[in-house]
Image (cartoon, grey):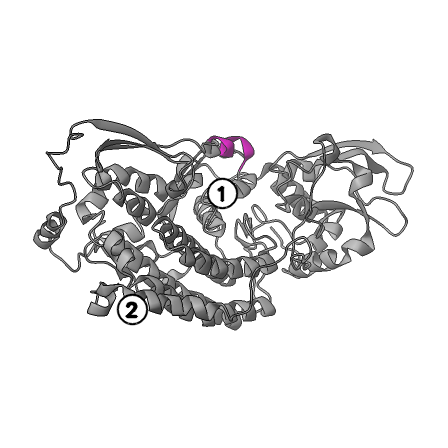
Amino acid sequence: MSTVQRTGVDDETRTKRTFEYAPGVVDRDDPLHGELLELNMGPQHPATHGVLRIQVLLDGENMVKVEPDVGYLHRGKEKTCESLGWRKFFVHTDRLDYLQPLMNNCAYALALEQLGGIQVPERGQTIRVLLMELSRIMAHLIYLGTTSIDLGAVTMFFFTFSEREKIYALLDAYTGHRMNNTYIRIGGVYADVEEHAEREIRAWLAQFPRKIDEFETMLTGNRIWYDRNRNVGILTPQMCKDWSLTGPNLRASGVEWDLRKQQPYSGYEHYEFEVPVGTIGDCYDRYAVRIEEMRQSVRLAEQALDRLARTRGAEFLADDRRYVLPPKSTVHTSMEELIHQFKIVTDMSLPKGEAYHAVEASKGELGFFVASDGTSHPLRCHIRAPGLMNVQAIPVLAEGRLFSDMVSIIGSLDFVMGEVDR
Amino acid sequence: MVIVKRKELSLAEKLYLPEVLRGLSVTFRKMFEPKVTRQYPEEPLPKTEVTRGQPRLVVNEDDAIACVSCGLCEAACPAYAITIDGGETDRAIEREPKRFDIDMLRCILCGFCEEACPKDAIYMSDELELADYSREALIYDIEKLKRPKAALQKRIDYVNRINKRWQTPSST
């Protein structure tokens, strides 16, 4: 990470701020002082955002020791990939971080394309960017809704969910499913965006910034939101590096690191957008960064739609018969195409080698490492899920603080257990 | 790069009460907006030709099933939901499935079978509701999967439309 630029506050102020707010003041006259209570938070606790169990050792209201326990949703995805083969694993990537299935699809496809040296046509890349930005908005809406309902703002939950429902309706009308879209293919996407879908997405994007303003009306100046998030769970850039935190959590600490800018993929270098960064790195900054990211995603999606309008009718799938299914009409008439069809479905193999490709997902760097021995089944598929790193940061942030801060910290770190346990 | 603002609370916001009223004004305005709740079973979700519902087998105009039991959908299925036993037939296409079962409890509606089928025999219908009293009843056999071509025509047209790429066959 040589190009990291530090912004905002210097280290001294940052440390000062950390200790300005003293949460762990233990009342030594309390008769119960010194008696520790072990508390299990989860795996069914609604504030743990899935099946995460956290063992907390409490001294009164203060957390002495915090230990997250992951694995309740382990389904062996990485091993499944080895037995399923390259193509069939796409449906499993949907179910990793189920709030942004299209993003996972893209990350996996990009890793395979890097391994196979496949060029995706421009229109295919643009459609992917559009879908990835829509998924980012969807995932951030869930973050906003669930975090605010955990902190007591029930109305916000319904506001964000009704917006998210509209994206789901768009995806339903355009990709065929609301969740688990399985829409991305090696070399491009499954189908082209039709003109009416473009219009509908544009109409939704036009009204969405007003909705973000509305969310901010509810939260930004809200005293409860303010008190429960300000100066809670402060992450310094060094801590982020130590715990390999990426994405909005890292940016909220003031590090400008966005894979869309630093290692552009899918043509992100041609788009105009800003990377939002925070100054202190507390829960409030993480909230503000995600709100700004949604606005930037709207900008990106609009630019992608403009590009789609320019390239209408162009190819959206790579013309590569080793990996891409031939069009159906030719399968009926040409023997070679029929052979390709059978070969790709039953025995599509990628060249020998290794590849790692990461995308900037809503929760951080989502990377797929794939190793191939030249056969139709991967030798190894490792998923670098950002959620796991975010879970690791819970004890660092929570220990020594009040128990009520735990909910803010869990909410603001933002993880999905489907991806953490995979 | 844009540095996000850290808003400091004004006096009115610190007092909290005016802010409660301001927040309630947003909530109050919402009361007069159109309802977004859908009364689901009575008011079904919109279905288009894009909707990927449960897979169904095409029956051609001559009442014969289009499937030739090549087993490509079985190979493409990531959920191992399809089981096929092939057999001979007197018809011109020579082969047809003796048994074609789709375990609807396993099916994840991904559409890979439709994509793989070289004979246009299996299509994703817009049928989505799935409920029964036993697991066995949800393993659909040929009789339950058969649909006349006309019922699937919209989906067939859609698949043909999205496959209109590379007009000339490639030389690879």
Q: Indicate the chain on which mark 2 is placed.
A: B
Which quadrant holds residue A242? Answer: top left
Instruction: Name the one closer to the observer, A283 or A368.
Output: A283
Instruction: Name the one closer to the observer, B81 or A164.
Output: A164
Please state which of the two labelled residues, at mark 2 or mark 1, is closer to the viewer: 2
Q: Indicate the chain on which mark 1 is placed.
A: A
Please give the residue where the numbered disc 2 appears in the rendered image: B18
Q: Is residue A341 left or right of residue A66?
A: right
Q: Above or below — where is A178 with respect to B131?
A: below
Quarter holding the N terminus of chain B is bottom left
- Asked if residue A299 can be seen in this view, the reply is no
Q: CA distance from mark 2 to mark 1?
A: 47 Å
* Number of numbered labels in the structure image: 2
Which residue is painted at 23% across and 47% down in the image? A233
Magenta residues: mostly which secondary structure? helix
Please give the residue where the numbered disc 1 appears in the rendered image: A93
Residue A146, which numbered label?
none
Are the residues flagged by discs 2 and 1 from a single subunit?
no
Q: Above or below — where is A54 with respect to A294?
A: above
Q: Above or below — where is A193 with respect to B131?
A: below
Q: Is residue A259 left or right of residue A84?
A: left
Circles 2 and 1: CB atoms closer than 8 Å: no
Residue type pointed to by label 2: Pro
Q: Which residues are magenta?
A: A79-85
Q: Crowding near pointer 1: few (<14 within 10 Å), some, many (20+)?
A: many
Expressed as whole percent of the image width and height from the top left, the position of residue A35 reads: 19, 27
Residue type pointed to by label 1: Thr
Disc 1 element? helix
Expressed as whole percent of the image width and height from the top left, the position of residue A419 reads: 42, 40
Expressed as whole percent of the image width and height from the top left, the position of residue A122 reads: 48, 62
Let me know if residue A5 is in the magenta part.
Answer: no
- Asked if residue A405 can be seen in this view, the reply is yes
